[in-house]
Image (cartoon, helix red, strand yellow):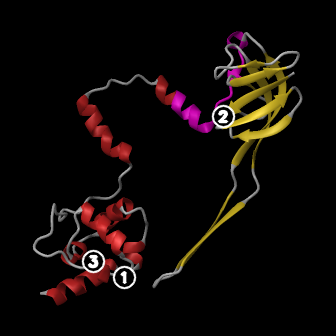
Amino acid sequence: MFAVLKTGGKQYKVAEGDVFTVEKLIAEAGDTVQFNEVLMLGGDSVTVGAPMIDGAAVQAEVLEQTRAAKTISFKKRRRKHSSQRKRGHRQPLTLVKITGILEKGAGKSGVMAALGTVSGAAVAAAAKPVKATKKAAAKAAPAAEGKVGNAPANLLKGAKGDADDLKKISGVGPKLEGVLNEIGVFHFWQISEWGPAEIEYMDDRLSFKGRIERDDWIKQAGEFAEAAK
């Protein structure tokens, strides 16, 4: 008999005795876990879920927590100020052995569900009672957005007179200039007034970290602003 189960966003065709790795589960070596998302059961006859089969499950023993082979990510940018970055990553995995396939009665088995690290966090969050109020939602909004630093106080809704050509700053092209304008940055003097907290905020908004300080935007902007007087 075989089953097709789903865990960690992937599907696996398994049979009793199979040993394989899945995305990291919240469990220790020696624990027995139960995969409750079963898409198909096969044997003398085939049962297909819609999308899951009610009451079906696959039980497995956790053999060990391990990691996949290292993968290397290498990026190189060829610009006026070239940069390169090399990173390694080993995906956390869980090695399991299939011990049984249940066609029904999964809810009464008493075996803990196989939860991944993301789904486990979601379950814990869902278990906490939440009193939803407009005031609480407003306070929670900034934290949910994950913003860092402080927004510059000198952001504008529109340019004061003619907007400066921000492309003169090293590392700023037409696309990035457009993004800066959308945020409310039109003039060199605005950039020259940013402090550490404002730089951190803008780094986050522009989705790159360190470029403002690496290319010394503040100094460049100050010089251009002074020259424009």
Q: What residue type is labelled 2?
A: Ile
Region of the chain picked out in magenta, as a range: 106-123
* Chain-order first, disc 2 or disc 3: 2
Residue under numbered circle 1: 170
Mark nearer the viewer, 2 or 1: 1
In the image, residue 29 above or below residue 188: above
Whether residues under marks 2 and 1 lie with C-beta atoms below 8 angstroms apart, the answer is: no
Instruction: Provide the secondary structure element on which disc 2 rests.
Output: loop
Distance from label 1 to label 3 (Cα)? 9 Å
Q: Which residue is drawn at 19% across and 63% down?
A: 155
Q: Give residue 89's position: percent from left, percent from top.
A: 67, 58
Q: Position of residue 214 (x, y in %)?
A: 42, 78
Asked whether 31 or 201 is in front, the reply is 201
Identify the residue shown where x is 32% and y is 67%. 199
Q: Where is residue 182 in the image (x, y as percent from the top left)?
A: 26, 61
| Position of 157 relative to 24 (above/below) | below
| Callout 2 crowding tier (Cα within 10 Å): few <14, some 14–19, many ≥20 | some
Q: What label sits on residue 26 in the rendered view? A: 2
Q: Is residue 12 left or right of residue 163?
A: right
Q: Do the residues labelled 1 and 3 touch (CB within 8 Å)?
A: no
Q: Residue at x 37, y 73 (%)?
A: 212
Distance from disc 2 to disc 3, alpha carbons, whole Å, reads: 50 Å
Amino acid type, residue under disc 3 in the picture: Leu
Whether residue 45 sits left or right of residue 121 in the image: it is right
State the quadrant of the N terminus: top right
Which of the numbered marks, if any, corresponds to residue 145? Answer: none
Give me the C-alpha separation between circle 2 and circle 1: 47 Å
Question: Which residue has dot 3 on it?
Answer: 166
Q: Is residue 123 left or right of residue 136?
A: right
Question: x, y (%) of residue 191?
Answer: 25, 73
**Picture quadrant where residue 99 is located:** top right
